[in-house]
């Protein structure tokens, strides 16, 4: 099997280098996963634009989006994204114990719990959430806009999970605790 390496920024296309320069300015580093996705500047650009767009006028706060990222990455068994999003979730205010609770598929706050359970169901059942998870999501106070955004968040995180699954690049965040 071919080994995928994390490319050096200077060996990528000029378009990718420009994108990664902006990432580095914002994050203080270029995560290995972003650099690897940068083999395709269009894939990297679309991923970053989708992430940014889903953060504006969103049904979910940045903290809630991290909870969704955690549960999807857990379902997809993505050690890279679990490490990255555990770090980000803690930066957004979750405790380590709460990140573990989320990864186990629940949360003590009812509304976020419904979103976590729906994201889990969507990821686990290849998009088909099931009537119970959907009903609980709406009962918790979410609407159609939130459903579409949550589905997009699941798809976006699944993309990065799948990139890691097929590259197994080195994880450059503190490893998430096993559950």
Image (spheres, helix red, strand yellow):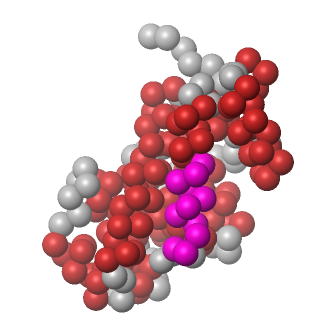
Give left or right: position of 16 versus 133. Answer: right
What residue is at 72 percent from the left and 66 percent from the top?
A: 91
Highlighted range, magenta: 48-58
Q: Residue furthest top?
A: 1
Image height of 42 relative to 64, above or below:
above
What residue is at 48 percent from the left and 55 percent from the top?
A: 179
What residue is at 34 percent from the left and 87 percent from the top?
A: 140
Q: Residue 112 lies in what quarter of the image?
A: bottom left
Q: Residue furthest front?
A: 15
Image height of 163 relative to 13, above or below:
below
Give left or right: position of 148 versus 162. Answer: left
Task: Give coordinates of residue 87: x percent, y percent.
Answer: 67, 57
Image height of 72 relative to 66, above or below:
above
Instruction: Mark yes or no: residue 149 visible.
Output: yes
Instruction: Mark yes or no: residue 171 visible.
Output: no
In the picture, the quarter occupied by the N terminus is top left
What residue is at 45 percent from the left and 28 percent from the top?
A: 166
Task: Give coordinates of residue 78: x percent, y percent.
Answer: 48, 43
Task: Give coordinates of residue 167: x percent, y percent.
Answer: 51, 26
Q: Nearer the viewer, residue 148 or 170?
A: 148
Q: Residue 149 lies in what quarter of the image?
A: bottom left
Count of numbered circles on the image: 0
Q: Nearer the viewer, residue 95 or 44?
A: 44
> How would you classify the magenta stretch by its main secondary structure?
helix
Task: Give coordinates of residue 151: x percent, y percent.
Answer: 36, 61
Q: Is residue 126 magenta?
A: no
Q: Residue furthest left?
A: 131
Q: Nearer the viewer, residue 143 or 164?
A: 143
Q: Residue 93 lies in what quarter of the image?
A: bottom right
Give left or right: position of 73 versus 174. Answer: left
């Amino acid at each position: 099997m071919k080994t995928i390496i994390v490319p050096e920024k200077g060996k990528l296309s000029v378009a990718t280098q420009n994108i990664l320069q902006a990432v580095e300015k914002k994050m203080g580093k270029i995560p290995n996963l972003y650099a690897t996705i940068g083999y395709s500047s269009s894939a990297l650009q679309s991923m970053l634009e989708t992430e940014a767009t889903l953060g504006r006028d969103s049904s979910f706060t940045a903290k809630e989006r991290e909870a969704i990222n955690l549960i999807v990455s857990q379902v997809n068994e993505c050690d890279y994204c679990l490490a990255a999003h555990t770090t980000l979730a803690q930066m957004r205010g979750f405790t380590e114990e709460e990140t573990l609770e989320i990864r186990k598929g629940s949360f003590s706050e009812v509304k976020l719990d419904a979103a976590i359970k729906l994201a889990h169901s969507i990821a686990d059942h290849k998009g088909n959430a099931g009537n119970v998870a959907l009903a609980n999501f709406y009962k918790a106070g979410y609407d159609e806009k939130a459903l579409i955004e949550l589905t997009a968040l699941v798809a976006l995180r699944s993309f990065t999970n799948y990139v890691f699954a097929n590259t197994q690049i080195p994880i450059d965040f503190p490893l998430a605790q096993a559950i």
